[in-house]
Amino acid sequence: MDDKWKVKRATYHLYTFMISKLISTFGAQIYTFAISFYILQMTGSATSFATNLICSILPRAILAPFAGAITDRYSKKTIVIFAQIATTLTIVGLLIVTLTSGLSLLSIYVTTIILSLASTFSGIAFTSSITGLIDKGRIQKAMSLNQMSISFAAVGSPAIGGILYGTVSMPVFLLIYMTASILAVILESTMNFQLFSQPKEEEKGEQKESILKSIKLGISYLKLQPVIVLMLWIGLLVNFLFGAFEVGYSYILIEKLKLESQHFGFTQGAFSVGMLLMSLYFSMRKEVKFPLLVSKRGILALGILMGSVSLPLISTLTYNLVFAYYLVLMFCLGLIIIVINTPLQVMLQNTIDDAYKGRVFSIIETMSMSLIPFGMVMYGFLYDIFPGQWVLLLSASFLIMVVLVLARPPVLRKAHPELAEENVGIEEKVKEINVKI
C-alpha cells in the first residue's frame, strides 16, 4: 500500500512539476520579452541590451558552484520555495519603483541580477531533486514533460507578449509575472522532495565542512566519473562552436538575406514547436538504452544542420524558398536539441549520487556557460571579417570532428558495456547465418 501511495504521489509530482514550470517560465518569458523591447525602445542601444544579458548570465556562471554546494547541504524544497519567494518579492519591488519613480535601467539591471540568482538556486535544487520527486521508471518522462513546458512557454509567450506590448503598461507585465510566481510557490509547497530520496545522516557531522570544501568534494567526486567528465568536455566544446550558429543565424537572416521580422519570428517559433513535439515523444516512449550514443548521433546531426544554415548564401533561392527552408531547418533543429539533451539528462539523474547532485549539476552549468561569452565575442568578430558561410561551415566541421574524436567507439563501449555485448551478439548471429548459407 505504501508503494502504491508513493507511485500516486509521484504522479502528482510529475504533473505539478510540469505545471509549476510552465507557469513560472511563461511569466518569466513574457517579462523578458517586455523588458527587452522596453530597453531597446528607451535607449536604442544594443550595449544596454547586452548589459542586461550579461547581468543574467554572469551571476549564474559565477555562483552556480556555491548554489550546488548549498543545495546538497540543506533542504531542496526550502531552497526552491525561498528562491521563488525572492523572485516574487523582487518583481513586487520593481513594480513599486515603476509606479512611484518610473522604470530605470539601474532598477532593471538590479532586478535581472536578483532574478538570475534566484533562478540559479531554484533550477539547481529542482534538477537535483528529480530522483527524490519521481520514481526511477519515469525519470525520462519527467525530464521530457519539463522540457515540454519550457517549449510551450517559448511558443506562446512571444505571441502573447507581442499582443500585450503597446496595448498595456509595464506594470501589467510585472503583475502577470508576479501572479505566475505566486502560483508556482503554492504548487511547489505541496510537493514532497524526499519521496524517493535515500535518508541522509546529517547528525553524524559528515556535512559540517565549509562551502569551499564541499565544492572541492564535488569536484573530487566528478573526477571519479569519467563518463560525466567526457560529457562535460563535449558540452563545453559543442556550446563554444555552436556560437557560430547563435551569432550567425540572426545576422545572416536579417542582415544578409533581408528576411522580414514576422517571418524571422515564425522560424524561431518552428524551433520551439520541434522541441515541443520531440519532448512529447520522449515522454511516451521507454527510456533510451544507450543515451551517450543517441546524443552523439544527435550532435552529428546538429553539425550538419548548422552547416546547412549557409546553403542559401552559396545558392540562388527565391525569398519564399528561403523562408520555407529555414522554417524546416529550425523545426529539425528543435527536434535534435531534445534528442541530444533528454537522454543525457536522464543518464545524469540515474548516475549521480543524490548527495552530490546539486554540486555536479552546478559544475555542469558553469562549465557549459563558461566559454559562451568568449564564443559570442569571437564569432561576432569573425562574421565582420569573413563570409558567413565559411564561418558556419568550418565551425560545423570542427563540431563534428570534436564529437567523432571524443565520443569514438571505444569510449562509448566503456560508457555502455552492454553496447559491446550487443555488438558481439550481432556478430555471432551474422556468423550463424553465413554458416547456414
Image (cartoon, rainbow, N blue to C red):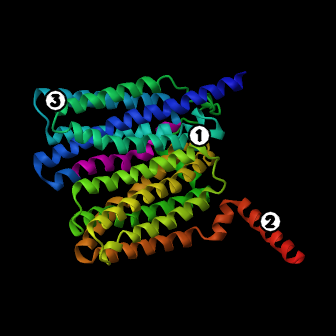
Q: Position of residue 120 (x, y in %)?
A: 40, 41
Judging by the rendered image, the residue that carries numbered circle 3 is 97
Front residue of 268 and 98: 268
Judging by the rendered image, the residue that carries numbered circle 1 is 355
User: Can see residue 314?
Assistant: yes
Could you tell whether 409 is left or right of 173 in the image?
Answer: right
Could you tell whether 25 is left or right of 276 in the image?
Answer: left
What is the quadrant of residue 375 in the picture?
bottom left
Q: Main secondary structure of the magenta part?
A: helix
Judging by the rendered image, the residue that carries numbered circle 2 is 425
Q: Give, as a three-letter code, the residue at label 1.
A: Ala
- Helix or strand or loop: what does disc 3 sit on? helix
Marks 2 and 3, how far apart at CA = 68 Å
Front residue of 301 and 290: 301
Part of the protein shown in magenta: 51-72
Which residue does the image show at 46% across and 70% down from the upper left?
304
